[in-house]
């Protein structure tokens, strides 16, 4: 019997309370680990420098916490029906395929909420084949599926063990207290970031654009560097200049880049037609 079976045997009140603590613990751990992964990815793969990833200032990427929490619930819900499948392979295919679908849906819903409600694009797959509104694409759905297979075969059992150790800790009350501190800081961080997002939303609507969050963040750092001002890692949007001033420079550079790309494309078309 695993820890979740034991929790299900509790009275309804205790069961709900325990699940709230357990789910809060899973979100906290994996939202933080996701932030570390994204930080290292930007440092060594994409941006080649230290960039604070995500919408929040602190070490937390909610989409990872929500993702792992959703996948854990999904797998736990499927395990009781495994016996009805003709073989283990078919069951695993259903589990892993479902993980790919769930993570794609989480990405789609999260991406569209920010685009529609905030005029902010947190990530951009516009250059990927088969993308939908730049927020999902077949390539990353396959990547999520591959990550889901790793999660299912190598991480899920460890998560159950981690939760078991957490619930049975002698210092469980202290652990809950520390979680309270974490979520208190998270709430303040979220409110602050949302306030910033609303300012950008207003500016974006005035200029009739969708702001690419990460690109704008890097643009501010570039502006500060050119002004010989050290950028803040924790608060990458902090600047002696106004956000609107940075946004004007960002839009100007974006238009210049777009015009330059069109000019290059036109030149290539002319060269190709001459060769033919």
Image (cartoon, helix red, strand yellow):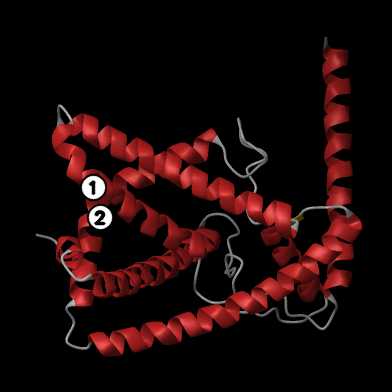
Label at residue 252: none
**214 over 172 or under it: above or below:** above
How many numbered dots are placed on residues in this image? 2
**220 over 227 or under it: above or below:** above
How packed mark 1 is, by other alpha carbons closer than 10 Å (few <14, some 14-19, many 20 or more), is few
Query: Where does residue 99 sit, x and y in percent of width and height?
Result: 37, 43
Query: As rendered, which of 37 and 155 lies closer to the eye?
Result: 155
Residue holding disc 1: 153
Q: Residue at x 64, y 56 (%)?
A: 122
Q: Residue at x 72, y 57 (%)?
A: 117
Residue holding disc 2: 156
Query: Where does residue 73 sit, x and y in percent of width and height?
Result: 32, 54
Q: Quadrant of residue 251?
A: bottom right
Q: Quadrant of the N terminus?
A: bottom left
Kindly give the residue lying farthest to the front in the view shown: 12
SS for callout 2: helix
How packed mark 2 is, by other alpha carbons closer than 10 Å (few <14, some 14-19, many 20 or more), is some
Q: Residue at x 55, y 60 (%)?
A: 42
CA–CA distance in space, label 1 to label 2? 7 Å
Please indicate, yes or no, whether residue 109 appears anywhere in the rendered image. Answer: yes
* Tag 1 near tag 2, CB within 8 Å: yes
Residue 60 falls left or right of residue 176: right
Residue 139 falls left or right of residue 1: right
Please indicate, yes or no, whether residue 252 appears anywhere in the rendered image. Answer: no
Q: Quadrant of residue 135?
A: top right
Query: As rendered, which of 178 and 61 lies closer to the eye?
Result: 178
Query: Where does residue 76 sit, x and y in percent of width and height?
Result: 25, 51
Q: Residue at x 15, y 26 (%)?
A: 86
Query: Where does residue 257 sit, x and y in percent of width and height?
Result: 84, 48
């Amino acid at each position: 019997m695993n820890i979740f079976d034991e929790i299900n045997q509790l009275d309804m009140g205790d069961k709900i309370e325990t699940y709230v603590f357990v789910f809060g613990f899973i979100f906290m751990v994996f939202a933080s680990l996701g932030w570390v992964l994204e930080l290292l990815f930007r440092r060594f793969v994409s941006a080649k420098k230290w960039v604070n990833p995500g919408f929040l200032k602190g070490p937390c990427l909610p989409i990872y916490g929500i993702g792992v929490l959703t996948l854990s619930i999904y797998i736990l819900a499927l395990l009781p029906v495994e016996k009805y499948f003709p073989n283990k392979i078919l069951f695993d295919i259903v589990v892993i395929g479902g993980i790919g679908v769930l993570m794609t849906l989480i990405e789609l819903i999260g991406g569209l909420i920010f685009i529609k409600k905030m005029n902010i694009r947190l990530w951009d797959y516009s250059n990927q084949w088969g993308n939908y509104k730049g927020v999902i694409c077949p390539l990353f759905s396959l990547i999520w599926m591959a990550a889901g297979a790793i999660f299912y075969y190598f991480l899920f059992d460890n998560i159950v063990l981690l939760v078991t150790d957490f619930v049975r800790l002698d210092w469980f009350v202290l652990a809950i207290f520390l979680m309270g501190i974490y979520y208190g800081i998270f709430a303040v961080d979220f409110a602050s970031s949302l306030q910033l997002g609303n300012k950008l939303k207003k500016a974006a609507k005035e200029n009739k654009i969708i702001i690419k969050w990460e690109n704008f963040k890097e643009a501010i750092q570039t502006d500060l560097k050119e002004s010989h001002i050290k950028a803040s890692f924790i608060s990458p949007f902090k600047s002696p200049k106004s956000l609107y001033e940075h946004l004007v420079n960002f839009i100007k550079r974006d238009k210049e880049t777009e015009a330059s790309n069109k000019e290059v494309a036109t030149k290539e078309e002319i060269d190709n037609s001459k060769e033919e």
